[in-house]
Amino acid sequence: MGMSSWASCAVLLYLVLFLTPSCPILFLVTALPGNYLTADAPTSWTNSLSAPDSVKFDDGSFARIILVSNFSDDYYRACGCGFICNQTCNSHLFAIFSLSYDDNVNISKSEGPKVVWSAKPDNPVSINATLQLTSEKGLVLKDANESTVWSTNIFSKSVAALNFTDMCNLQLLDDKNATVWQSFDHPTDTLLVGQKLVPGQQLTSQGGLFSLHVTRQGLFAYINSNTPQRYLNYTGNNISYVQFLEDRLFISSYESISYIITIPSSEFFSNRYMRLGADNGHLTVFDTYWSEVHEVFKFRITSCGFPRVCGNYGICTDGQCSCPGPINATRNFQPIEETRPDQGCSLITPLSCAASKTHILLELHKITYFPFTQDPPSIDPDHQHISLDSCKQACLKLCSCKAAFYNSSKRAGNCYLLPQIFSLMAIDQDNTDIKVYIKIQNVSSSDPPGQQTSHKKKKQVIMGSSLGSLLVIFLLIGILALLFWKKENADEAEEYYLDHVPGMPTRYSYDDLQAITENFNKELGRGGFGTVFEGTLPDGTKVAVKHLDGFSQIKKSFLAEVETIGSIHHINLVRLIGFCAEKYHRLLVYEYMSNGSLDRWIFHKNPEILLDWKLRKKIIIEIARGLSYLHEECRQKIVHLDIKPHNILLDENFNAKVSDFGLSKLVDHDQSQVVTNMRGTPGYMAPEWLSSMITEKVDVYSFGVVLLEILCGRRILDRSQPEEEMHLLDLFKKNIVEDRLLDLVDKYSEDMQLHGGEVVNTMRVAAWCLQNDFTRRPSMSMVVKVLEGAVNVESDLDYFFSNQSLPNMRAGVENQEVHIVAASSLFPSILSGPR
């Protein structure tokens, strides 16, 4: 039935019902034929302002409507799906949007559409873009130049139809009407009635400043600064999903203890949308006509508790905004707009890293900060249990630090260093537990009379400075030209090298990897040399793409990684699928490991995510097998040089795989030792690094440290422990002597305690690997045999473990390569320069 025919029927029924008072108007929508429209694959639509189903609204916006879905219980309201542009129409989105109808059941042009979901909000398309519905890939959005902007990535199932439900949910169906993809599973900034968020999903405000995350532990809202700062949390226990149900936000738990946030109803119309605000971070409920009904966070957050209520540096006092006042008659802050105090404040003298020696910390009294109104935020382990003075000095030494917050509650002594400051909150009296310090530039006073330089001397200084500047400029030009020439030659050499390494993995272009990662949209984590993003290959295979950051160092890391594992394959080594070396871009494509790195599973104190003994033992053996392969079974011996829990990845079945070969070293099998630059992570580095003469036994030592961490469930250096228990190796030695190794078994895991005898026996393997004399450490193949029960641990072990202080190193630094000059004389036969 066409649009005009069912519209006529609707108008006729409307007149009948309008003249019959006993019939409630709510039933008008029953005259509209069907609650959704569908389209069969294959089909395509072009974004055109002149298409028959394009509508221009009175506010200047356009919509090229593909599907229309009528609500079943609201008066003259519907959702549309298609291309939409704002008033200027300089960019377009493929989106789902709300529509209203006039008395003639035609789309009302007086009320512009409001977007509730879009396919790629940060990457709009142009006129003549196309949306294709295919059976192989589902929906594919292409710009006018035929470049793919977005797709539903349906590769493993066949798509038969596109379906638009009465809940404004866009679905892809197979030939049995089963849903293979739906927009409800990919929320943007808005929830519709009935829509769920499951752990791992989030709402992200338009522009990306705010986000609302659902995890197993609850519902959390963040402002996404350089370091995301949390401004709200609803903690729960083993959360399964969060759902918007018109009159409540329902937080369901696997533990049968659910939580309900009640939402009042609109006076005349039903609640329909829940949106995370782009400017303020509010989670606001709107009714059918987009009138604000309720602020969901209002009972948890005061008006001053939102991060942007008074802009950066602004102080909120009972909803009123102001700037930090003068200190000692010196005014350091000014409003960004005098008439708009809620726009925030700026420093009168901006901070300069070049003048960091004149940075000072300004203490603010009777002030707190929004993260401290919730549960205490997470903290860098390096900043736990330190003094107030150490906290202040840490901020002054770090140019990116804009403020320091020191929390001494419960004698914790925790220091929070923030790279960005949002709104502050005034309180009635000083909080003795929390100290607030804002970094400012100390402006020195002018020279006193009698100290001014004479005019003649000034002229001489100016002339001398000018000549000196010219010489420096010419020198810099020469240096830059030389560096450019060297870089060109180095790039050519690298290209030749990459083209001639045997067994190389797939080479991708940078554009390919942008598409695979949806423009590097989903970050999985950060390491010492780069950031890792989730991606999906055209065949549907999930991958992890590491984008290397830096200059000369990334070239070393990149070549080391490609050369090392580009052509080797082992079940316990992460597979390198491909790489990109294009201009200054260096990227590596690995198989995707869904359970992340080992450190997140063994250092948690939450018993719900602790690994049991069976899994830990499996992981230990698999790490050992991977290292044994590298040391003994490859064409060239490969020394990893950075074995630590962060570099052990776990797949969906908790199979362990060694990763991150950016510091590795290739060694011929006939070489007993090599000399190389110091490289690795403090705490995991063997004592022989002090001489720079290393063998594969440095990996055996690192494995011993990791083995001990897995069994004890704590880091090798844990500053949260009492001073005498901070260093695990010292504690290990002490407990061996006192025959109390059972005390070291992970006390947070009941299963580990139950298998204490086996765990203690495995600790003796760690002791063997940690021998100071590297010749007394076992090979990794021997370690595998011991762990599998085929061989016993050597009995005559030295328990004087030490990880000596290494030059230029500090505990806790990740992936830091350190260069030293060895004092010992080195024989040319064993020299091998650093890669």
Image (cartoon, rainbow, N blue to C red):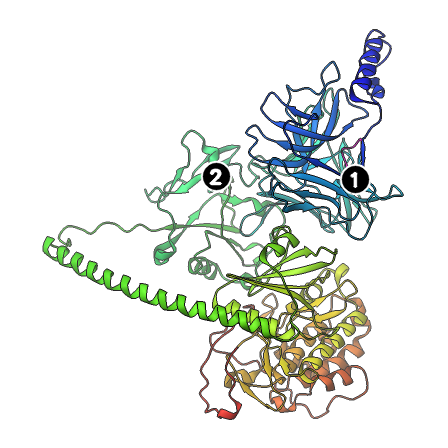
Q: Is residue 451 left or right of residue 756?
A: left
Secondary structure state at the residue bearing disc 2: strand
Viewer-closest of 833 and 537: 537
What is the crowding at mark 1: few (fewer than 14 residues within 10 Å), some, or many (at least 20)?
many
In the image, what residue occupies the spot 57% across and 39% down? 306
N-terminal-most mark, 2 or 1: 1
Residue at the outermost right position = 176
Question: Of the residues tagged 2 and 1, which is closer to the observer?
Answer: 1
Q: Is residue 33 magenta?
A: no
Asked if residue 242 is positioned above or below residue 289 in the image, the reply reads: below
**Residue 330, image x and y in percent?**
33, 43
Q: Amino acid at mark 1?
A: Gln
Viewer-closest of 744 and 339: 339
Quadrant of residue 329 within the rendered picture: top left
**Residue 610, image x and y in percent?**
75, 64
Which range is magenta?
165-169
**Residue 477, image x and y in percent?**
32, 63
> What is the number of the mark on residue 171?
1
> What is the number of the mark on residue 315?
2
Q: Amino acid at mark 2?
A: Ile
Q: Is residue 604 left or right of residue 427?
A: right
Is residue 295 something that shows in the picture?
no
**Residue 156, image x and y in percent?**
80, 53
Quadrant of residue 360 within the rendered picture: bottom left
